[in-house]
Image (cartoon, rainbow, N blue to C red):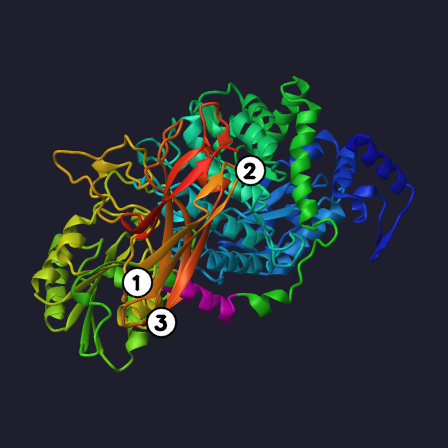
Amino acid sequence: MKKSTIYYLIICLFSFYTYPVGAQSIKHPYQDPKVPVEARINDLIGRMTSLEKIKQLDMYSGKEVANMGGHEAASFSEEKAQKMIGNTGVGSVHDFYPLNATIANQLQNYAIKKTRLGIPILFIEEGLHGYLGHGSTMFPIPLMLSSAWDTMMVHQIGRTIATETRTHGVDMILGPVLGLAREPRWSRVQETYGEDPYLDACNGVAMVKGLQGNSLADENAVISEPKHFAVHSIPEAGSNASSVSIGEREIRSDFLYVFEKAVREGGAMGIMAAYHDLDGIPCVDNKWLLTDVLRKEWGFKGFVLSDLGAIRMTLDNHDVASSVSDALAQTFKAGMNMQFYDFSHEKFDTAMLKALKENRLTEKDLNDAVRDVLRVKFRLGLFDHPYTDTTLVSKVFHSEPHQQLALQAGREGICLLKNDGELLPLKKGIHSIAVIGGLATSQYLGDYSDGHDGVSVLDGLKDRVGNSMSINYAEGYNQDTSSVKQADLLKEAVNVAKQSDVSIVVIGEYENEDGEGKDRSNLNLDENQLKLVHAIHEADKPVVVVLENGRPLTINWIAKNIPSIVEAWYPGEKGGLAIADVLLGNVTPSGKLPVTFPRSVGQIPYYYDHKPASFHRYIDEAKTPLFAFGHGLSYTTFHYSDLKISPSNIQVNGKTTVSVKIENTGKVEGTEVVQLYVRDRVSSVTTPVLALKGFSRITLKPGESGIVHFELGHDALSLWNREMKRVVEPGMFSVKVGSSSDDIRLQGKLTVDKK
């Protein structure tokens, strides 16, 4: 018997009864929680008018339905709700950020009580590294989270974001970003988990699972919506939303791999389609992406949201649509489910109805699009438990455990890039520290952290040293001052450096230099910041450079001349404390770079897992990176030994275990991130010279040792062959274990035989 027939019989059976729920009664099967979800969806769709269906595919903004107090909704407005929502209902509301759950409950109550069918609203907000509502816990940028190589922590952060989000009545978060950061000029590198598909996939799955929890209907779970689907992160010339031309094999091997893991293993119920065109087809119109791969191959059951204005771009920028109706017909036939401020509500409704009338869209196309949106709402439990417990926020919002997790994330994500002469940690004999640079007082926490403040480097050091050392601050450089004033600031900074035992110079990217829409043509530091570092270096006192930035920078002179360099990224609300802990030795650094640092823009693209015939040979530049993927130093040392591959011969469908012994040979406790790489020696298609296939954090006391285990199987050894099938080919594989991609300590061989 077909599923549709079964659903129809269930609907007929339940239509004869009503069940009391509180003060209401169940009149229709879609209102009954005992009926299977798909049957409830079919029943509801069968009762909806075309306009009611279309409304479910539209997103409204908070200002249209509530009284806003700046960024947040300050109070519910029934007048606005009645005007905008009427009795038809709407799909979602964004940019709402209710100050409390009561406001969300009031708007939800209107949707349930005042619309004809009582379909609840889906509240969608930003939460890339912390719920963007006022007062939430703000974690380090995703790139820094990835620098920790700690997926258990990323999962905890996802749980925290979901918990704080749902306490406000918000049901869905736009994230994580799963593009591979292989174009550092691009403005959104900080939002990614780095350049490697395996590391990105591990972090992506951890975040998706953390956000979505055990059940979407729980009071501490939200929908996760990975973005931007797909290959958005390598735009032409590094310009956000520019065209991308790339072959299917590379798309599947690297870029789609990360999203596939988020859907298949993470269970993501949302996807955001990207702005750009991929091989000539806008992603929002790409049926191969949105339907053939996402739904048919991967079994995706959630809904696809356009990026803000992405559908409109097919009409205004890509020039592949002749009208609004044509643009909408193309995207919804391809697999879209909801517009994101693309067209006004009136224009959207009219154009969709026109597309139906002219048969550009069929009723089935419309039903299919609506079905996915409704499924998410049912899975969230919005039809059965639409209101949020208003007491939750006082129990969990920005709680002490959440703040401590933010501190942990900052500590683990800091990368020690260089430490000549063991200048760090700062020794007990140091009595005075010069803290220099405008960024030393910055509380900027990265993109998507509007209105949130954190602990600056200067305040963090003051907190940690107390009265044990004197802290002397000099701005040294200010973006907004004249050249004359700049000279005065520089002179003051040099004097402060000369009067101190050591200088901490904080430099990097200011808020106006990094974040969405702030693409760069070069990766150099601002000229005045570089002058500042030169001047402090010439003061002939020990210098430590702390970087706060959202992408790799070309810091060649600093890398050559400054003894100690700390990459601190944008380290979250407790970032200044985390940086101070590392500088002072309260914490031993363990972060590893999730991206390659090039020496110049001319080397781009430069990522470690390139193909064998991809070279970086120039007459005017070195062929090596400035800092390699996986690089990160410690205050202790680790010895690798006893590499074992058991068994060393497997069949194409088999598995093997790789183990290695790690010993702390230094004087302090530390954590090493052990990295496992694989090389397919001979294959039917070209494969990377080195590919990360496993990593593990191990914490050891001085003299202590431990065994790290990895498993290699189909996922790690497979490739997309010439027939575009994912297979494991017989042959020999090199297995390499090390502390970074350019610091391999041990290697062995694995042979794969035919069945």
Q: Nearer the viewer, residue 129 or 352?
A: 129
Whether pointer 2 and pointer 3 mark residues with C-beta atoms closer than 8 Å, the reply is: no
Q: Residue furthest bottom?
A: 467
Inspect the image, locate mark 2, and give the three-letter code of the amino acid beneath it. Answer: Leu
Q: Is residue 213 above or below residue 751?
A: below
Q: Nearer the viewer, residue 97 or 576?
A: 576
Q: Nearer the viewer, mark 2 or mark 3?
A: 3
Label 1 to label 2: alpha-carbon separation: 47 Å
Q: Which range is magenta?
A: 398-411
Could you say where residue 617 lies in the image, as x and y percent from the top left?
A: 18, 34
Label 2 to label 3: alpha-carbon separation: 48 Å
Sequence-earlier tag: 2 or 3: 2
With 519 as the anchor, is 530 left or right in this view?
left
Q: Residue 275 sits in which quadrant?
A: top left
Residue placed at 36% from the left, 70% from the top? 704
- The tag on residue 305 is 2
Could you say where residue 491 lies in the image, as x and y percent from the top left?
A: 10, 63
Inspect the image, locate mark 3, and give the three-letter code of the amino acid beneath it. Answer: Lys
For the question of whether residue 35 can be seen, the reply is yes
Residue placed at 11% from the left, 73% from the top? 499
**Residue underneath mark 3:** 701
Whether pointer 3 and pointer 1 mark residues with C-beta atoms closer than 8 Å, the reply is: no
Inspect the image, locate mark 1, and give the three-letter code of the amino acid beneath it. Answer: Phe
- The tag on residue 638 is 1
Q: How many numbered discs sit on the rendered protein?
A: 3
Q: Nearer the viewer, residue 350 or 651?
A: 651
Q: Is residue 580 above or below residue 571?
A: below
Sequence-earlier tag: 3 or 1: 1
Q: Secondary structure at mark 1?
A: strand
Q: Secondary structure at mark 2?
A: strand
